Amino acid sequence: MELSARNQLTGRITAIRLGAVMAEVVVDIGGGLTVVAAITRASVEALGLKEGVEVRAVIKATDVLIAT
């Protein structure tokens, strides 16, 4: 699949925390770094996401905020 989003990080799912409607998907992108995505539970099920599956985290944002 071709996407216009340039921020794409390949990794492996290390954890999925399912809620009633939403889910947190933790992706190990290497170097001791992880990305956590909040997606719908329906998307987890439709994509067949499970621990150990290789995925691509696609980050598309107009703002990045940094605070101290």
Image: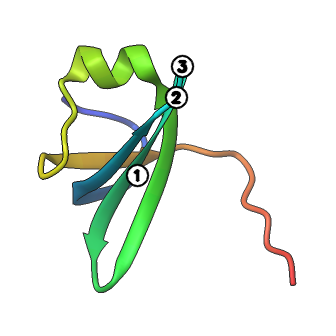
Tag in front: 3 or 1: 3
**Percent x, y for residue 39?**
49, 30
**Percent x, y for residue 43?**
37, 19
What is the C-alpha distance between the residues marked 2 and 3?
4 Å
How many numbered marks does the figure carry? 3
Which of 37/19 is in front? 19
Tag in front: 2 or 1: 2
Q: Quadrant of residue 48?
A: top left
Classify mark 2: helix, strand or loop.
loop
Q: Quadrant of residue 3?
A: top left
What is the C-alpha distance between the residues marked 3 and 1?
32 Å
In the image, what residue occupies the spot 54% across and 43% down?
60
Q: In this image, 29 relative to 20: left or right?
A: left
**Percent x, y for residue 52?**
12, 52
Label 1 belongs to which residue? 6
For marks 3 and 1 on the same chain, the one whose residue lies earlier in the sequence:
1
Q: Quadrant of residue 49?
A: top left
As drawn, the label of residue 19 is 2
Classify mark 3: helix, strand or loop.
loop
In the image, what residue occupies the spot 29% across and 85% down?
31
In the image, what residue occupies the spot 26% across and 48% down?
56
Contact flag, marks 3 and 1 (Cβ < 8 Å) = no
Contact flag, marks 2 and 3 (Cβ < 8 Å) = yes
Which of 62/18 is in front? 18
Q: What type is the residue that disc 2 sits on?
A: Gly
Q: Quadrant of the C terminus?
A: bottom right
**Percent x, y for residue 35?**
44, 61
Label 3 belongs to which residue? 20
For marks 2 and 1 on the same chain, the one whose residue lies earlier in the sequence:
1
Q: Is residue 47 above or below residue 8?
A: above
Which of 12/18 is in front? 18
